[in-house]
Image: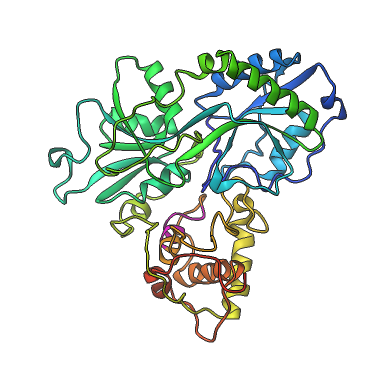
């Protein structure tokens, strides 16, 4: 079974909501630690190999938990409670934990090592074909792009122009969609491509950088509070392995090539060498096809870069109150009770609403949210409910209430960058 780890970054990586984790005091000085890897990760074997080498260099014996990160049996992500339970019961340290600059979670209760794999989300096409070639596009000129449902892959995909989308439930199936012709292009984490090629050595792909703030991740070791000495020893071991070339030898086949082709859809894409991640999809079926494929997503994607600053649309106090209730019921488990991020990225603070020059717009956020959220039941709310939820997000990011209600039309059409409001 593939267990979903996502859900954006937004992603946002399991960091910020990892509340008080009780860790065995012996972890500080013990010569043996229990290691978990992230479920469903195509790099799990790499993570184990790196963990063995690092802990051996640190003089620490490693035992690998067969159970891995816990899951409560649901399909709506891994909660902070479940993560904490695993660290208390099954693991002292997690190998292959994802981090990114847009989902940093600096107030997390977890401790992190330096990164050991820098990679990123990429754009993948079959070798010898071109995704923008009209001969492989539909009569309307659009191509089909595969993405992994409710992950950064999906967020990056909605930024692509002239596209329709094929949502898959795992990163392996996302690559497979290109290999089997269900899509002309895929947005996927690069190690998933490596794992697919190992299973299908006859299959060859062209790989290009995916230009997006959500494309860049790194894999680290994570542990609970009180493990500073453990993480110090891990970091010291990583430095030794990096300096003598052993870390590069372990990760060489998993890192992005030094020179990578440039995708025509992002002709000036620059490869940011600071991160990586797999973020797999859910175990339940994909959302209804008409929600995603025929939702009227604007050609420029759900997140639109704009230069001009205009006024944010008005909303009232009652909408904020109702939106807060909706958020607690449908969004908090993934995005955190205080919007701090959990299995999905933070929806407050500079990673979501920076002081200036945001690459997100209010209309882009509303369009994506109303089409794809909540992850376990996309599009389940009414237009009025999504508008109230947007009002709550605006209020918590510094915008003041007014006397006019926010309508779905006003929210969707807003081109105002989502910068922190004046109350901040």
Q: Residue at x 49, y 33 (%)?
A: 278
Residue farthest to the right? 25
* Quadrant of the drawing holding the C terminus: bottom right
Q: Residue at x 60, y 79 (%)?
A: 318
Q: Residue 401 vs residue 272: left or right?
A: right
- State whether the magenta stretch is mostly helix, strand or loop: helix
Q: Residue 105 vs residue 266: left or right?
A: right
Residue farthest to the bottom? 403
Depicted 170 relative to depicted 389: above or below: above
What is the x, y in percent for residue 203?
A: 30, 19
Residue 382 appears in view: yes
Q: Residue 224 vs residue 402: left or right?
A: right
Query: Which sits in the foreground, 244 or 186?
Result: 244
Q: Residue at x 59, y 59 (%)?
A: 348
Q: Quadrant of the rendered structure where residue 307 is?
A: bottom left
Q: Count every numbered label the image shows and give the total.
A: 0
Depicted 346 relative to depicted 280: above or below: below
Residue farthest to the front? 243
- Region rendered in magenta: 367-374
Q: Is residue 153 magenta?
A: no
Which colour scheme appears in the figure?
rainbow
What is the x, y in percent for residue 130?
A: 20, 34
Residue 90 appears in view: no
Q: Quadrant of the rendered structure where residue 266 is?
A: top left
What is the x, y in percent for residue 86?
A: 72, 33
Q: Residue at x 26, y 44 (%)?
A: 265
Query: Which sits in the foreground, 167 or 260?
Result: 260
Q: Is residue 370 magenta?
A: yes
Query: Which sits in the foreground, 285 or 57?
Result: 57
What is the x, y in percent for residue 153?
A: 42, 42
Depicted 227 relative to depicted 29: above or below: below
Depicted 222 relative to depicted 295: above or below: above
């Amino acid at each position: 079974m593939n267990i979903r780890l996502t859900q954006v970054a937004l992603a946002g990586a399991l960091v910020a909501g990892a509340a008080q984790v009780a860790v065995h005091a012996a972890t500080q000085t013990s010569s043996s630690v229990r290691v978990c890897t992230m479920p469903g990760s195509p790099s799990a074997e790499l993570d184990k190999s790196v963990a063995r080498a690092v802990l051996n260099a640190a003089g620490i014996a490693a035992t690998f938990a067969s159970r891995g990160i816990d899951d409560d049996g649901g399909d709506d992500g891994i909660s902070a409670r479940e993560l904490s339970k695993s660290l208390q019961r099954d693991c002292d340290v997690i190998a292959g934990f994802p981090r990114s600059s847009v989902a940093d979670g600096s107030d997390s209760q977890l401790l992190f090592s330096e990164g050991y794999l820098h990679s990123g989300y990429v754009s993948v096409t079959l070798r010898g074909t071109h995704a923008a070639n009209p001969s492989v596009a539909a009569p309307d000129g659009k191509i089909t792009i595969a993405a992994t449902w409710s992950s950064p892959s999906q967020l990056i995909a909605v930024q692509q122009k002239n596209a329709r989308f094929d949502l898959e439930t795992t990163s392996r199936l996302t690559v497979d969609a290109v290999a089997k012709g269900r899509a002309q292009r895929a947005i996927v984490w690069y190690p998933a491509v490596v794992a697919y090629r190992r299973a299908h050595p006859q299959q060859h792909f062209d790989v290009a950088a995916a230009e997006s703030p959500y494309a860049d991740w790194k894999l680290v070791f994570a542990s609970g509070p009180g493990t500073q000495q453990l993480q110090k020893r891990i970091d010291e071991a990583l430095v030794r392995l990096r300096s003598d070339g052993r870390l590069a030898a372990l990760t060489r086949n998993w890192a992005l090539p030094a020179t990578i082709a440039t995708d025509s859809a992002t002709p000036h894409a620059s490869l940011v060498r600071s991160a990586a991640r797999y973020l797999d999809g859910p175990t339940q079926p994909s959302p209804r096809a008409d929600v995603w494929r025929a939702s009227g997503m604007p050609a420029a994607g759900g997140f639109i870069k704009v230069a001009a600053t205009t006024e944010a649309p008005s909303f009232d106090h009652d909408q904020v109150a109702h939106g807060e209730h909706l958020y607690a019921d449908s969004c908090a488990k993934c995005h955190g009770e205080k919007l701090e991020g959990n299995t999905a990225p933070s929806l407050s603070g500079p990673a979501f609403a920076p002081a200036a020059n945001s690459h997100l717009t209010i209309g882009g956020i509303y369009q994506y949210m109303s089409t794809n959220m909540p992850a376990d039941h996309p599009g389940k709310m009414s237009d009025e409910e999504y508008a109230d939820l947007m009002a709550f997000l605006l209020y918590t990011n510094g915008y003041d209430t007014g006397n006019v209600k926010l309508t779905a039309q006003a929210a969707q059409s807003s081109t105002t960058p989502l910068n922190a409001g004046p109350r901040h």
